[in-house]
Amino acid sequence: MADWLEEGQNAPDFTLAADDGGEVTLSGLQGSPVVLFFYPKDDTPG
């Protein structure tokens, strides 16, 4: 099972594919406002 985050806990650093073919890391966004949205699974109300 995956590790769970508690409310108020910092998210771990991660890397995702960007629209331009590059990569975006959470640590690379440091100093900018960032909103992360977590949902339980696809096709559920959120």
Image (spheres, rainbow, N blue to C red):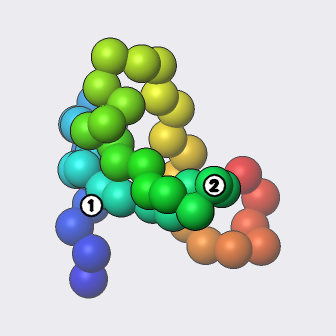
Q: Which residue is mark 2?
A: 20
Residue at horizontal 30 percent and vertical 26 percent from the top: 30
Q: Are marks 2 and 1 in contact (CB under 8 Å)?
A: no
- Residues at marks 2 and 1, CA–CA distance in whole angstroms: 30 Å
As drawn, which residue projects farthest toward the front? 21
Number of numbered discs overlaid on the protein picture: 2
- Above/below status of 37 relative to 9: below
Q: Nearer the viewer, mark 2 or mark 1?
A: 2
When asked about the image quadrant of residue 8, the answer is top left
Q: Secondary structure at mark 2?
A: loop
Q: Earlier in the sequence, mark 2 or mark 1?
A: 1
Task: Tell whether 23 sits left or right of 5.
Answer: right
When asked about the image quadrant of residue 11, the answer is top left
What amino acid is at disc 2?
Answer: Asp
In the image, residue 21 lies at what x, y percent? 58, 62
In the image, residue 33 lies at what x, y percent? 46, 19
Q: Which residue is mark 1?
A: 4
Residue 14 visible, this orientation: yes
Who is closer to the viewer here, 43 or 12?
12
- Above/below status of 32 relative to 44: above
What amino acid is at disc 1?
Answer: Trp
Q: Quadrant of the N terminus?
A: bottom left
Residue at horizontal 43 percent and vertical 49 percent from the top: 24
In the image, residue 37 lies at what x, y percent? 55, 45
